[in-house]
């Protein structure tokens, strides 16, 4: 990944996606390639509180955890070269998305079918994730469906995060985020010459059908199954 030109503009790359999709694993690869440390919002909350996310949710409730999570997002730098991994529920609050956008964040949705995530997360790992642990299979499927729509609606990029190694996924994240970042740099230069600047939403490149979970070709699941996607590759690091 090191050879890829990441542009002169600070590139705040923000990974989102469902629990177990590999945000931390891929985020660490990404951070290494960018020559920075990963900023993981769950870890930021944990180090601030001195206890695990699970314990915070159990002892103080999800609402308080979400407040800490929002504060962590509020501490991220603006327009600096940074790799960020969000907790899977962070984009459930619109103010978090707004805060990331204000910082020039490029939102990258790492997507994988729920079946793959279920296989990846061993019991101990689901226990560390209070929201996963308390949902039954039906509840989890519903949450996944709802969240998938929200991720898709917020993302600048949708990247397939199953059936291939984390390094390859991180490389694709850098390549495609760089295209967006460099596009923004061009737009900023144009603006200083009196031209119209596109905002980050307008600057979003059209997603290719291959990467879009709700492409015209049909639902995510069928496109993945036909691609023969298996569990593995970018599993969770916890
Ligand atoms: C959550 C996901 C977790 C963590 C918390 C809540 C969620 O992070 O923030 O347990 O609501 O999906 P990961 O997505 O890294 O597991």
Image (cartoon, rainbow, N blue to C red):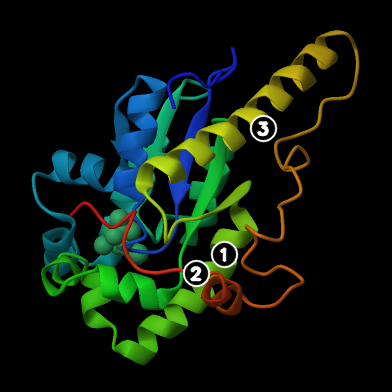
Look at the image and tell me in which quarter the N terminus lies. Answer: top left
Q: Which mark is on residue 174?
A: none
Percent across and percent down for residue 147 are 50, 69
Which residue was labeled with disc 1?
150
Look at the image and tell me in which quarter the C terminus lies. Answer: bottom left
Q: Which mark is on residue 180?
A: 3
Q: Is residue 85 above or below residue 144?
A: above
Which is closer to the viewer, label 2 or label 3?
3
Mark 2: few/some/many CA within 10 Å (<14, 14-19, 20+): some
State the CA–CA distance, disc 2 to disc 1: 5 Å
Percent across and percent down for residue 195 are 91, 18
Q: Mark yes or no: residue 134 visible.
A: yes
Q: Closer to the N terminus: mark 2 or mark 3?
A: 2
Give the structural element (helix, strand or loop) at label 2.
helix
Task: Give 124 or 229, whichever is nearer the viewer.
Answer: 229
Give the structural element (helix, strand or loop) at label 1.
helix
């Amino acid at each position: 990944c090191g050879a890829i030109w990441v542009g002169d503009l600070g590139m705040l790359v923000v990974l989102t996606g469902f629990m177990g999709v590999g945000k931390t694993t891929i985020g660490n690869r990404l951070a290494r390639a960018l020559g920075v440390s990963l900023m993981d919002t769950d870890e930021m909350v944990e180090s601030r509180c001195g206890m695990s996310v699970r314990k915070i949710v159990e002892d103080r409730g999800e609402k308080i955890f979400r407040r800490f999570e929002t504060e962590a997002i509020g501490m991220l730098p603006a327009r600096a070269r940074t790799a960020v991994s969000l907790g899977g529920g962070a984009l459930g609050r619109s103010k978090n998305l707004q805060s990331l956008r204000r910082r020039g964040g490029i939102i990258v949705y790492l997507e994988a079918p729920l079946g793959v995530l279920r296989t990846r997360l061993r019991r101990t790992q689901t226990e560390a994730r209070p929201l996963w642990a308390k949902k039954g299979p039906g509840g989890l499927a519903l949450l996944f469906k709802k969240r998938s729509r929200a991720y898709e609606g917020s993302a600048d990029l949708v990247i397939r995060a199953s059936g291939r190694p984390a390094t390859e996924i991180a490389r694709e994240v850098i390549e495609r985020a760089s295209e967006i970042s460099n596009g923004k740099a061009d737009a900023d230069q144009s603006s200083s010459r009196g031209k119209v600047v596109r905002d980050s939403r307008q600057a979003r490149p059209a997603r290719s059908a291959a990467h879009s979970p709700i492409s015209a070709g049909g639902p995510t699941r069928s496109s993945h199954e036909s691609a023969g996607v298996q569990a593995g590759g970018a599993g969770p690091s916890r």
